[in-house]
Image (cartoon, rainbow, N blue to C red):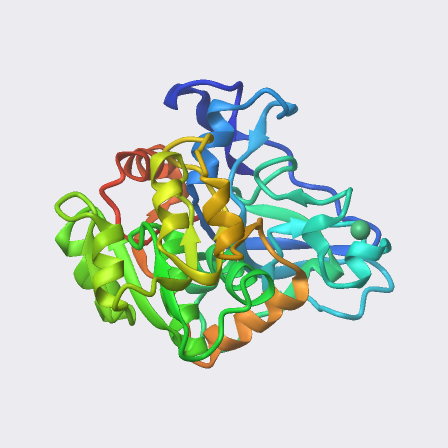
Amino acid sequence: MRALALVAHGGPEVAQLLELPDPVLPIDGAIIRVKACALNHLDLWVRRGWPALRLTFPHIQGSDIAGVVEHVADGVIAVKPGDRVLVSPGTSCGNCAACGSGNDSLCAKYHLRGETMAGGACERVAAAANDLLRLPDSLSFEEAAATSLTFLTAWHMLVARAHLARGEWILVQAAGSGVGSAAIQVARYLGAQIIATAGDDAKLDRAKALGAAHAINYRTADFLSEVRRITAKRGVDVVFESVGGETFEKSVRALAPGGRLVTCGATSGAEAKIDLRVLFWKQLSLLGSTMGGKRELAEVLRLAGAGHFKAVIDRVFPLEKAREALFALESREVFGKIVLVP
Ligand SMILES: [Zn+2]
């Protein structure tokens, strides 16, 4: 089968379209014919590599997979050939305390497709039956793939971690990113009052169209003083962070007493300074988050199917143009998801 795979860590040249063997049918699962695979910035970071990441090459990219069940192993009854499914981007052991409580992403054996295991930017993938979720008829394969990782991440951050409640104020940083635009929609669904930041006016307009009541261009205005002005000096109850670096300290300062900051990324820098006096005086909570559980993914998929969430798709590329797709992703001249179709 054809696959977008890394032959080593490095620059754009190491991501290649290769002919690789088909996956083997797992004893507890199925082979899925891939119909759509959405890309994430994660795919670029995996390509560049980091010290703790140990991959076997060639390594197939792509975490967000939707397709049709082609074969199932004997005894598998949860799915059958022809079913339209979403493949959970995360896999876990299914037996430990973390998995039992729905916190799959805290499992010691948690793996993310395209990161520490083979991804789905190819023609077929193997998956355990309990990693497959039936697609609502109202969602196309492209929409389902574009929804999965970003909405799951935003949902886990705002619901499970920050407990964002109706009527609360939230500041969504980097609203033009995939998780940022998902966070606005999750916050809108939860009934929060949303302030979004982005680096250009077109992205601010899109953030408002998705549900932000206020949008701040962080290149032309100081977001902290704008947040204070909008909230009559009180600050916000929750900050949705993925930027890190110098933004982080000001994000902490934007919180109201009792506020929660939840973060899933550090795109502009992995180190940040915090005034600990602000942390304890204002009784703030700093929360880390990554991915989410399969039950949460099922809920996200149900809400997307019911029309509450709409993944923003920038462009769809055929698998043969995968390198062009990666180039578009890297250029950052995109609003929403880049999706590959084999
Ligand atoms: Zn587990």
User: How far across and how far down the image is residue 257, in percent?
Assistant: 45, 62
The residue depicted at 53 percent of the width and 18 percent of the height is 8
| Above or below 219: residue 134 | below
Q: Is residue 237 left or right of residue 208?
A: right
Residue at position x 77%, y 42% in the image: 109
Q: Is residue 84 visible?
A: no
How many discs mark residues in the rendered view? Answer: 0
Res 249 visible? yes
Q: Residue at x 40, y 31 (%)?
A: 269
Query: Residue 189, percent across and down?
Result: 42, 77
Counting from the top left corner in percent of width and height, residue 183 is at 41, 62
Judge from the rendering whether residue 231 lies leftward or rightward of residue 183; answer left or right.
left
Q: Which of these two is toward me, 270 or 72?
A: 270
Choose top left, top right, bottom left or bottom right for residue 226: bottom left
Which residue is at 63% across, 55% downward?
A: 32
The answer to which of 308 and 25 lies nearer the viewer is 308
